Amino acid sequence: NDRIIVGAGVSYVEVSGLLTILDTPVASISEVNAFINKNGTSYSGSFQSRVSGQAFISIAIPPILVPVVENDYFELWLYSSQTGNFKPLGDNKSVYLTVKVVE
């Protein structure tokens, strides 16, 4: 679980995310959710993908403007309520959390 920590002198950032995973669920239909956490709490809302059987899943979280203070942090999380084997493709090379300083 890597995170991006906000430095001094920043008051707003633009945050977005993208991940691609291989879903090999035990259940026949799987719901996979992705969301951006700010300081351990979901900030972006949840973006969902539903699949049946083994599939590649890409979930994009569009940019959002977020007020911040020094030492706030952001993480990109993946969640499913069903049992399955979800793994990012390419040793996490397909998971992107982008934080851009706006002000």
Image (cartoon, rainbow, N blue to C red):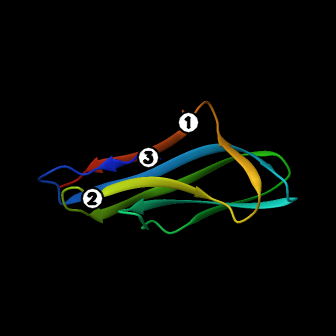
Please, what secondary structure does the residue beneath circle 2 have? loop
Picture coordinates of residue 94 (x, y %)? 56, 37
Q: What element carries label 3?
A: strand
Give the vertical position of 79 relative to 89 (above or below): below
In this view, the residue in front, 68 or 102, is 68
Q: How far apart are marks 2 and 1 (CA)?
A: 23 Å
Relative to 87, residue 62 above or below:
below
The residue closer to the viewer here, 69 or 17, is 69
Which residue is the site of mark 3? 97
Q: Which amino acid does label 3 sit on?
A: Leu
Q: Nearer the viewer, residue 18 or 87?
A: 87
Name the residue tied to disc 1.
92
Q: At which x and y percent is residue 21?
A: 66, 43
The secondary element bearing badge 1 is classed as: loop
Q: Which residue is drawn at 55% across and 66% down?
A: 46
Q: In the drawing, does residue 19 fall left or right of residue 67?
A: right
Badge 1, how many Cα within 10 Å: few under 14, some, many 20+?
Answer: few
Above/below status of 15 relative to 98: below
